Image: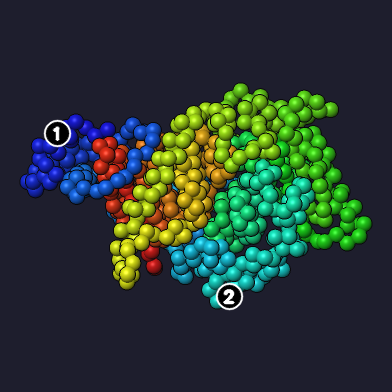
Amino acid sequence: MRSPWLNKLSVTLGPRPPASWLLLCLVCVLAVIAILGSTSSIAFDSVTITPVPNIYSNYRRLKEQAAVDYLELRSFSVSATRQQVLGLCGKEREHFVPCYNGEEFDRHCEMFRPRERCLVRPPKDYKIPLRWPAGRDVIWSGNVRLSRDQFLSSGSMTKRLMLLEENQIAFHSEDGLIFDGVKDYSRQVAEMIGLGSDAEFHQAGVRTVLDIGCGFGSLGAHLVSRKVMPICIAAYEATGSQVQLALERGLPAMIGNFISRQLPYPSLSFDMVHCTQCSIIWDDKDGMFLIEMDRILKPGGYFVLTSPASKPSGSSSRTKKRSMVAPIEEFTEKICWSLMAQQDETFIWQKTADVNCYKSRKSASPPICNEGNDIPPYYQPLMSCISGTTSQRWIPIQNRSTEQLSSYELQVHGVQQDDFSEDSQVWRSALRNYWSLLTPLIFSDHPKRPGDEDPLPPFNMLRNVMDMNAHYGGLNAAFLDEKKSVWVMNVVPVRARNTLPLIINRGFAGVLHDWCEPFPTYPRTYDFLHGYALLSHLSSERCGMMDVLVEMDRILRPEGWVVLSDSVAAIDMARALAAQIHWEARVVDPQNGSDQRILVCQKPFVKK
């Protein structure tokens, strides 16, 4: 909270303190610093988190000037300890992903020790991505780590998926997956689960799909057109990354595997899990990979497995395929899955919707987990027991009748209907005001078009959005209410209240994450980063604010935007640090009498 001393000071001296007083203050600050000594890391004050965001309305020039002067005064106090402006990393770090050493696919953040801080530079030929939906089908080849030689040496499947031109990669949205094209394949899956077409996925309760080893996102791109939320996960790849290409196309994706650890999703998360050529031996490790899929799959959900190595050509191929699937089929019976359909190379299992099935099994192996300890599934070791069976969230996907969460479902998540409705209304207003804030900044350097009023920024200038402290997913819902063509990665900090099950039940993309660790994505993969009360949350964490801002710079594309809403103390410090990483930063006072400010930043396009 802002100290009473500062309030009294502003009343006494007015909005613009005398220069002599500023000089005297600076001398005093330097004297204190000399006594206490400088520190290698910058800390910031612990602040009280306001439960609901404040809405930003009109601007009063006098108070805005007072806020600016106050921030300039506070910047004097950190100038002596402030590090120099950060330089650029070497060329070898253009596609750098911390926690992965390039040799092992598993994540090792506990072994990651950052060297001297630096900013990941864009490749020499990097260009701003095309706006959606054009950017879904065409990307700049210089933006991803896939060279012409790698493309030419790749298999025929890759060449069917992509067309490499001089400086662009074009994706064939109508062809290239399995044998009959993406649309036909998606329709085939829908028909196999008893639907007339894939336009009816929502009617069957399928709103979220985890796509394991998603290739270059062709199925995901099609599912988006069907209003289904696909989330691609794939292991880290040093070159030709599936995740990097999918994100460059504006499709939800993140680095992830479950070789030895759980995925960072709660139990009972997804309506469908899809795997095509994902190179996983599913019955390995005593079925622990299938148990992990069972953990994240909702009751009544579907597991789709397709292995299109070759088309079936006679009884010998069918016999071979059946022998490959037999061990999986034997194990799935033990975890109450039933083989629902088989067609060509595609097999679909359905998880039971009846929780009593586990008690009536012939064998108690694998056993039911003892879930007394509610430990967030943040990269915990894989389990050999079945989880989720005692959860209040055991609600079959076929029982969801509407797109909105019912009062009962909200109650299951410990949320009151009134609080949820108020949160939604607040974020609808907040989104409109964010756009009003961005308008003069985005168009300040552009001439006014003849005969037009100053336009609001087009929403399709953004596609990949991250809400770094998502709460109920209200910002995501506001984007959808405005019918904007963005998707949002809703991040729930691991030591915050775990609202991720609620977010995913709304049909949104989301993940648990510790912001003292790097996020599992490639550089330059998000257009817009948002954080409400994130800095206040980090005040109790083991990492410094500068480490988080440098990581934000890594995952933000050039000319991307950051909006942080927090207390004066936290925003003051963030503004000072933003200058060190070359961000253009402006502070906005919401003029509502609160101790909150909004920091609006843009990352420059550094061409070197």
Kindly report which numbered mark, 1 or 2, lies closer to the viewer in this rendering: 1
Residue 61 in the image: state x and y as whole percent: 19, 50
Query: Depth check: 591 or 162 in front?
Result: 591
Position of residue 121 relative to residue 83, above or below, is: below
Tell me the residue that label 1 is attached to. Answer: 8
Q: Is residue 82 visible?
A: no
Of marks 1 and 2, which one's residue comes earlier in the chain? 1
Left or right: where does residue 597 sit relative to residue 409?
left
Task: Estimate the spatial distance between the alpha carbons at disc 1 and disc 2, rounded to whole Å.
Answer: 65 Å
Going 50% across and 59% down the picture, which residue do you hit?
95
The residue beneath circle 2 is: 165
Place residue 264 in its image quadrant. Answer: top right
Residue 558 pos. (x, y %): 41, 61
Mark 1, Cα crowd under 10 Å, few <14 / some 14-19 / many 20+, is few
Q: State the SS at label 2.
A: loop
Q: Amino acid at mark 2?
A: Glu
The reply to whether discs 1 and 2 touch (Cβ–Cβ < 8 Å) is: no
- Name the residue type under label 1: Lys
Q: Is residue 114 left or right of residue 2?
A: right
Number of numbered markers? 2
